[in-house]
Amino acid sequence: MRTRIRAAGPADLAAVERVFAASYPALMAGAYDGALLARALPLMIRAQPGLLGSGTYHVAEAGGEIVGCGGWSHEKPGTAEREPGVAHIRHLAVSRDWIGGGIGRAIYARCERQARAQGVRVLECYASLNAEPFYRALGFSRLAAIEVRMGPDVALPSIHMRRPI
């Protein structure tokens, strides 16, 4: 089935959250402790309305259904900090049944083209442990092991990665 990538909007919030809920628990189960996932997943599967309405967040549709999503921002995740020429890949996910079909790569390619057109020369991401091989295959390099704060009592071990574009 053919997929189409388009800019997301606020009306896509529930569908994006369904993609997160269908993707993250299954893919992360082998990389993280079950108790940590029980605390982190409810926070991770919430879409960010501001990101969805930014014009830099995209969804992949197949047969009228959203099967993937992802975007980028100038700001570091969770902050208002910006670094000239650097942007950040944000909340990239593909529904479990669609993994391996090139949707994640297509969404990433859209993000990279759009970011480059806006003067970005470096993309960074905070990859979950299970996503590191995906980003490495896209040309990202590992900078450091980090913990991403999800809430006052939840920190998700992750990998800070970077790629010149």
Image (spheres, rainbow, N blue to C red):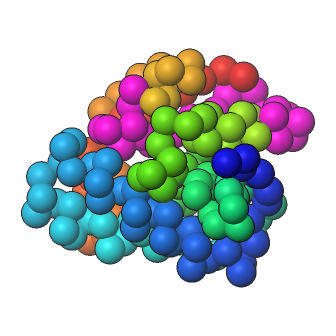
Q: Quadrant of residue 108?
A: top right
Region of the chain picked out in magenta, as a range: 113-133
* Residue in the image at 67% along x and 43% along y: 107
Q: Position of residue 46 (x, y in %)?
A: 46, 73
* Residue in the image at 69% along x and 62% along y: 63
Membership of 132 in magenta stretch: yes
Q: Position of residue 27 (x, y in %)?
A: 31, 48
* Residue in the image at 76% along x and 51% along y: 5
Residue lying furthest front = 1
* Residue in the image at 29% along x and 54% along y: 26
Residue 146 in sight in this render: no
Q: Position of residue 22 (x, y in %)?
A: 40, 63
Determine whether, in the image, residue 25 is placed left or right of residue 9: left
Q: Position of residue 116 (x, y in %)?
A: 82, 32
- Name the image quarter holding the C terminus: top right
The one of 67 and 93 positioned closer to us in this rendering: 67
Membership of 81 in magenta stretch: no
Residue lying furthest right = 117
Residue 78 in sight in this render: yes
Q: How many marks?
A: 0
